Amino acid sequence: MQVDVLLGLQWGDEGKGKIVDVFCPKYDLIARFQGGPNAGHTLEFDNKKFVLNTIPSGIFNEGTLNLIGNGVVIDPIILKRELDNLKAAGFDPVGKGNLVIARKAHLILPTHQLLDAASESNMGAGKIGSTLKGIGPTYMDKTGRNGLRVGDTSLPDFMDRYEKLKQKHLSILSHYGEIPDFSEKEAAFMAAIEFLKTIPFVDSEHLVNQYLNEGKRVLAEGAQGTLLDVDFGSYPFVTSSNTTTAGACTGLGIAPNKIGQVYGIFKAYATRVGGGPFPTELENETGEKLRQLGHEFGATTGRARRTGWIDLPALKYAIMINGVTELIMMKADVLDTFDKIYVCTHYKYQGETIDYMPYEIITHKPEPILKEVEGWNTDLTGIRSKDELPSALNNYISFLEQELNVPIKYLSVGPDRTQTIVL
Ligand code: GDP
Ligand code: IMO
Ligand code: MG
């Protein structure tokens, strides 16, 4: 058996949570492989809505085990809150035993968040627009070999290790100015660590490979999106992990030749939250219309998402980096009332026409070259079969498939689980 991977091809918030929830009955294990509570994955079913930050989106399917992999960074306070909320809504993954955590996953400390905030406020206009969840500083400690891991919480000297790392953080923070009081947060962190220890710790590399050897089906769930990847995104306006297929290998402990299908998710248009280049951005009424119709406000921070037209050079790049085998187009319904839709096919860049993402897009902005496409002017939200799709939408899908050279296998026409069409 091989591990299938589902990940975002744009700047995050493509609808990964919804589709993992739709797919999970076919899988025995759903495994988050990177990122942390900077993610907000929304699921809707039976008139209920849930936003998951750390917990994999297979959690509502009883027969599926959910793994928070070694590549993830965990804020125990947020994880506890997520689980408390689920319990209040009648779901109890800890009681039911369908959630496990990798021992090798790193912990986000309260001081990591202070460092994130201090670093961002020090950057002024060039700030990244971080979610301020402490993601960057935690990954810095991981690669700097100072981090605290989930498995460390069971060691007798955990408190010494915690104090040592905290002191290091306080010494850095003192260079930024006055350090805010975080005693309440620290107490909540310690309480959440005790709670964390009630969830089984596993070695994700052994668990996932054992599942494969037993012929069980595994789906790796990405967070953020390819254009936020620390190596291949619009650096430095990125997150601090590999959001791409390669990240599933290091973030779970699976060999590259164990990767099966790679599902690439994208919106029928584009959004970005936070700073950084966005070639097709619409800072006008059309952009506002997309934001309102698409409810483009962050699931984690509530910030308004920037909006724009779909960007094919960026999507082609994402497909290449990830080895995407099947595409999933989300939020087609948001375009239902647009007479004309636009697709960026090339960029005008430093006097030339190009169809790839150039290295330097921050000081030299690529200008999008747009192709006009007929809108479908049809309410898609009630459609469940591909045979009922309007011809203008079929033309849009065929055009994208031809350009991207990968089939679009699923179409999403609303936030609910049932609003998903197999093409
Ligand atoms: P994720 O981070 O990739 O899981 O995506 P988010 O949950 O942050 O953002 C996607 C948003 O779009 C959520 O509010 C979803 O409920 C919603 N959504 C998902 N698919 C569709 C769709 O096909 N149509 C509409 N209108 N909303 C959708
Ligand atoms: P999901 O999984 C959209 C963005 C932030 C910021 C940059 C760095 O829901 O798609 P960080 O907190 O990681 O240091 O922020 O990355 N960002 C996301 N944007 N969706 C996400 O996750 C994101 N996670 C981080 O807005 O620009
Ligand atoms: Mg999101």
Image (cartoon, helix red, strand yellow):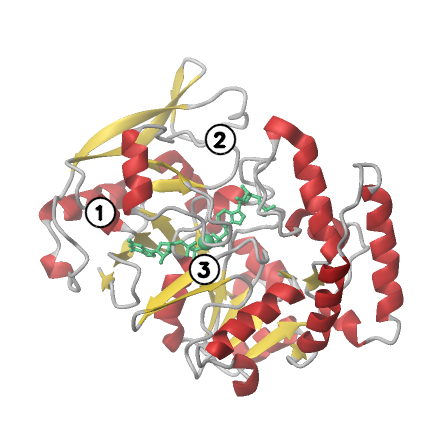
The answer to whether the residue bearing label 3 lies less than 8 angstroms from the nearest atom of ligand 1 is yes
- Say the numbered circle drawn on residue 41: 3
Report which quarter residue 328 is drawn in. Answer: bottom left
Mark 3 burial class by Cα count in 10 Å: few <14, some 14-19, many 20+: many
On the rendered structure, is 327 left or right of 141? Answer: left
Q: Report the disc number at residue 277.
A: 2
Q: Which element is circle 2 on?
A: loop
Q: Residue at x 72, y 69 (%)?
A: 150
Q: Is residue 411 above or below residue 312?
A: below
Callout in the foreground (2, 3): 3
Residue 92: image location, x then y, percent:
51, 82
Is 366 left, or right, of 73 in this rendering? left
Q: Is residue 91 above or below residue 365?
A: below
The image shows residue 227 at horizontal and vertical percentages of: 49, 42
| Sequence-wise first label, 1 or 3 | 3
Quarter of the picture holding the C terminus: bottom left
Q: Residues within 10 Å of mark 2 (few under 14, many from 20)?
A: some
Residue drawn 70% across the image and 33% down it:
122
Residue on which disc 1 sits? 397
Give SS at disc 1: helix
What amino acid is at disc 3?
Answer: His
